[in-house]
Image: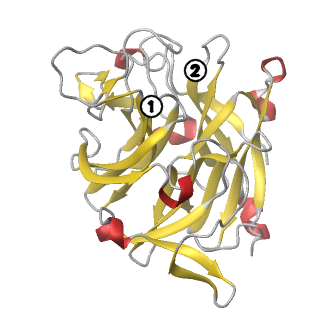
Amino acid sequence: MIATKVKDLTGPGHTDRFDVGGTDLGATVTAPDGRLVSVFGDTFSRAGVGGRGWRAPVVLFADPASVGSGMEWTGSAGRGEHARQVVRYVHKGVRRWGCRFRRVTTVLPTDLITIGDVMYLHVMVCRELGNVRWTELHRSTDNGATWRPTGVRWAADHHDGYFQMITWERGDDGFVYALSTGFQRDKGLILQRVPQDRITDVGAWEGWGFTEADGWGWGRPPTVALTGRFGELSLRRVEGRWMLAFFDQEHYAMDVMALDSPTADLYRAPRTTVLRGCNWEDEDHAGGRVAQLYGGYIVPGSTLADLHLVVSQWNSAMNWPYRAMQFRVDVSGLVATSR
């Protein structure tokens, strides 16, 4: 099951009018008003990394009807069309005299979720890339146009560092289920849940843990549910099935897994590689090979036969490409094997 490229989503000719030249990530959900909301990481005005206009995170809006042919941007969270930084802080090294904003290197988004008329964004507050100081939640009550801190914060070493990058999805039982890992790509996955109306109540989060006496159960310190070295995660329900897309550092690949439920055995769940990382000289987007591959976020409106993913790449030697792209893949056969 090999994913093929639909289009570039960011960069010259795609996001110039938003003053977005280089950016990455792109977790996407549907806002209460029906439009798509995508959140991106470190963003620069020029097509690459560095220079003027450094901000993170930024938000772009897309037409949900455009997913099949490649997301078409309709606007941004900002002033006019300029995509502004949606979390208030000053990047370390950027001088702003007299400001009272906190000074950190960057704030990177991991995932967002819509619950009723409210959207929540989970971010990592970093001092230098990869050094997470803490994570926190922000809230939007205007369909992703503006975001405000909820006051909820977790230490970087919460659950031994396994709660830095998260992905989450609502169940039919009133709970939000969250899989998470560390930012350093050296950890496996843990699972937690929280009542959807108490997502900002730190005490309401409970882990999925294992004991020899009772097996797996809720209300325990979370046990690693899948060992490995994982990066960006995306848990979404597609046509009633729980689908997990994730970056696998150990195998330099992007995988998709089909789950019967959030508590499915991740060692036995059907899993397939949809993209493989490669050297720049071996890149072949039609053949599922992407140089300096990372990211991988499921796009709303996907079906099992036509699953769309937002994929990132960064040529760290040349600083371009540094962009988000859209790929598609048929995973209906993967789901069939789990029945």
Lateral position of residue 55 relative to residue 184, left or right: left
Name the residue at 25% across, 38% down: 145
Q: Is residue 277 left or right of residue 297?
A: right
Give x and y (percent) for residue 201. Answer: 30, 66
Residue 136 x %, y %? 36, 49
Q: Quadrant of the C terminus?
A: bottom right
Precedes in sequence: disc 2 or disc 1: 1
Q: Is residue 290 left or right of residue 21?
A: right
Compared to 63, does 83 lie above or below? Answer: above
Residue 266 picture quarter: bottom right
Determine crowd level at label 1: few under 14, some 14-19, many 20+ residues with C-alpha closer than 10 A. some
Nearer the observer: mark 2 or 1; the answer is 1
Front-most of residues 127 and 303: 127
Q: Is residue 55 left or right of residue 191?
A: left
Above or below residue 128? Residue 191 is: below
Residue 58: image x %, image y %? 37, 31
Residue 65 seen in the current view: no
Q: Secondary structure at mark 2?
A: strand
The residue tagged 1 is 127
Q: Which residue is mark 2?
A: 322
Q: Secondary structure at mark 1?
A: loop
The one nearer the camera, 277 or 210, is 210
Q: Is residue 133 above or below residue 103?
A: below
Mark sitting on residue 69: none
- Which residue is situated farthest in the left direction here? 98
User: Label 1 near label 2: C-beta < 8 Å?
Assistant: no
Tag 1: residue type?
A: Arg
- Tell me the residue at 62%/57% (across/down): 244
Distance, label 2 to label 1, CA atoms, is 21 Å
- Quick check: 169 above or below 123? below
